Image (cartoon, helix red, strand yellow):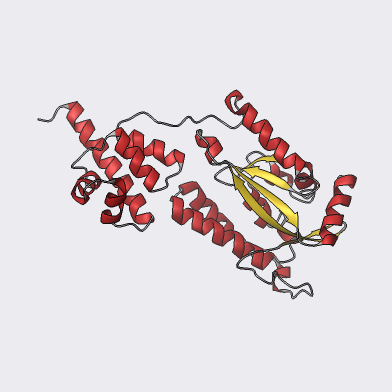
Amino acid sequence: MDSPRSTAASASSYAIGGLLRDWRQRRRLSQLELALEAEISTRHLSFIETGRARPSRELVLRLAALLELPLRERNRCLLSAGFAPAFAEATFDSQALAAAREAVQRVIDLHSPFPAVAVDRHWNLQLANASAQALLGAVAPELLQPQANVLRISLHPRGLAPQIINLKQWRGHLLARLRRQVHESGDAALASLLAELSAYPSLPHESERHDTPESPTPDVLMLFRLRSPLGELALFSTITVFGTPADVTLSELALECFYPADAATAERLRALSISGG
């Protein structure tokens, strides 16, 4: 009869093996390709994936790095193999991340009078500058309650959707981006969010034709065209992440900064900033 310890070790070996196999397949790598990169035999990798061999902590981290796993998933792999997590995970509002939180707030505040937000891995709003908040005046209050989700705010019929001039194109852009994230991460919460957003009804103005042209290169630069009290805003955005985070929460934080696509938008954003929206 197997001892409880040997049974637990076998179970953890199977768990880590399945995780590594799933991630390898998601990254579209063969066992041979990953084994060569990790400098182990294909046979050994096969044994790990089928639960016949238990990898060392060092090997788990090496394989996770080669598979470019997020820090959260690297911790999950270590736990599945019977090891302690390697990366800390503090909540964003904790004292441990106070310095990072203040730095992020400074960055997005300095982006004013143009909008900027900080979001977590599920697109939940963590921080926003005054310019971003000024654009949310017509959004239903319930959509702005914690945890407010920027994708839900964008596409919900009681959110920004009625104000988005190119809603059909913007909806397609956001859903395609979210779909890629679901495929790459396998995140159940993102999959649930995708299902929710995909079920939102089309709005009447999505079928209207507009005189203002769309972005000339929509595959490269998708413009976000929004009605405001001072006129149309044409924006594009960049997303920035921390370069060398050692904390899970920081590794998942993203800063999305919006820039004016033309001089008229820049002037309107400056005016909105002065007027407070």
Q: Residue at x 63, y 46 (%)?
A: 149
Which quarter shows the N terminus? top left
- Estimate the x, y position of residue 75 in percent, counting from the top left: 40, 36
Instruction: Kindly indicate the quadrant of the structure image that contains residue 8.
Output: top left
Residue 129 seen: no
* Quarter of the figure with residue 108: top right
Foreground pick, 159 / 256: 256
Left or right, 128 with reference to 18: right
Residue 23 shown left or right of residue 182 in the figure: left
Q: Which residue sits furthest left? A: 1
Residue at screen point 40% across, 39% down: 74
Q: Name the quadrant containing residue 78.
A: top left
Relative to 176, does residue 62 appear above or below in the rendering? Answer: above
| Above or below, 58 relative to 50 | above
Residue at 18% x, 42% y is 52
Residue under the point 63% across and 62% down: 171
Please give the count of numbered marks on the rendered protein.
0
Q: Can residue 30 be seen in this view?
A: yes
**Furthest-top residue in view?**
95
**Residue 36 horizontal/vertical position (percent):** 28, 51
Q: In this view, does 134 lie to the left or right of 79?
A: right
Foreground pick, 171 / 16: 16
Instruction: Please state the horizontal and vertical placement of residue 112, each as a whole percent of the image.
Output: 79, 45
Residue 165 in the figure: left or right of residue 61: right
Where is residue 269 drawn, in percent x and y? 83, 53
